[in-house]
Image (spheres, coloured by chain):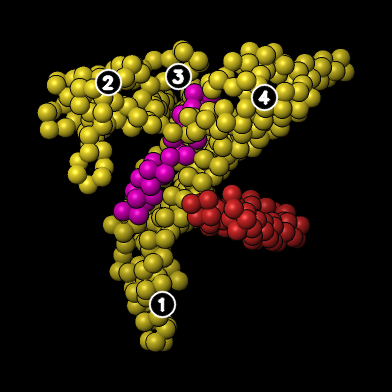
Amino acid sequence: MTIPRIVGAGLIVIGAGIGIGRIGGSAMDAIARQPDATSKIQTAMLIAAALIEGIGFAALFAVSE
Amino acid sequence: MQRKVYTKVLVAIMMMFTFSVNAQHGESHSDNTTKGITKTDVDNTIGHHMVDSYGFEILHGVGFPLPVILYNDNGVHIFSSSALHHGVVESNGDYFIASHGKIYTTDAEGNMMDDGHGHHVHPLDFSITKNVFTIMLTVMILFFLFKGMAKSYKNGLPTGFGRFMEPIVIFVRDEIAIPNIGEKHHKRFMGYLLTVFFFIWFLNLAGLMPFGMNITGNITITFSLAILTFILTQMNGKKDYWMHIFWMPGVPTPMKVILAPIELLGVFIKPFALMIRLYANISAGHIVLMSLIGLMFTFHSYMAGSAFFGLTIFLSLIELLVAALQAYIFTILSALYFGMAVEEHGDH
């Protein structure tokens, strides 16, 4: 639990949070424009979020060795 | 109106129940002078629940042992894991001891032997551990559930359990397999996609049950699943697939030379990410849940106990969602990779 590790973990969470937040925002804009396509948009949002979360977790894994 | 008040009061009373559990756990695993559970107790319990073990311990002292199957030069040794609790086990002339969850060969007094390279001598371990037992149990549950479902089809409609599972199977086919793999080739992969979806979902759910069966939070299990996806994509790769990796059409030649190693790395990184994603999501969820439950006890206060109890319930519901979501993500990414492998030229 050294300082560089804590800072690194915080940066990873910031990165993943910004990335997934932007995807969520775009998804909500798209759903507002075309409510019929909600399920397709939701599916695509989930896939993109999972990919970002994947590298986020890989990085957290590396930080905590 | 009366029922709404009744349920709210009931939930509040349940949250207050943490005080009685606090008093019982005054005697903890380590002998410490302070009353109650400390942080090290919580850490030990969490570590104990995350790793594999040679027997089942459902409650403190209640459980059943599982067979330990070892193989070394003297042949096969089979004994019950309850013998390991009492120290050195003797079997066919060899002595074994369990230390930190692993089994080592020892001499008659119980001293571990050195194999000359600085490692302790240990036999090949083929035991039925808790994880192996849970996987076998899940596989049998899946097999009998879906076999029964297939048999229950009368006049094209399922009865009984099949009615619940059919929409999910159709979901895997119509939303996961066909959009990603295409109408023509999806049938080849449906068996694997369905199996991996329900397997991961049921194993994640098993990990949320209070027996400490942490299976998908074990990196070897997720590694095996990712390796299966990897082998299936490479075995089904068409000429277009390999062309797109090493010599992509429509790209100037200097760029092709630069992109080819990156694409080759990508071939290995995609299953690696599958493995890490499932492992980290599930094990992080378990650690957070168990830490919250531990926090319930370490504060020694009724208010904190009940607040953390409510938070734990909320987080458990999220973990249920994560269990199904991670199974879905693994399946859809596998289908995506299969689709890229069997994509034909005309699809562009």
Q: Which residue is mark 1?
A: B259
Q: Which residue is mark 2?
A: B88
Mark identifier at residue B57: 3
Task: Give the residue type that dot 2 points to.
Answer: Val
Task: Give the residue type that dot 4 points to.
Answer: Phe
Q: CA distance from mark 1 to mark 3?
A: 53 Å
Q: Earlier in the sequence, mark 1 or mark 3?
A: 3
Q: Earlier in the sequence, mark 2 or mark 1?
A: 2
Q: Which residue is mark 4?
A: B297
Task: Give the residue type that dot 1 points to.
Answer: Leu
Figure colour of chain B = yellow
Magenta part, dominant SS? helix
Marks 4/3 same chain: yes
Q: Nearer the viewer, mark 2 or mark 4?
A: 2
* Quadrant where the image shows the N terminus of chain B: top right
Q: SS at mark 3?
A: strand
Q: Earlier in the sequence, mark 4 or mark 1?
A: 1
Task: Report whether B59 appears left or right of B298.
Answer: left
Mark 1 chain: B
Residue B144 position in % (x across, y down): 37, 25
Marks 4/1 same chain: yes
Whether tag 4 and tag 1 are in contact, CB under 8 A, the answer is no
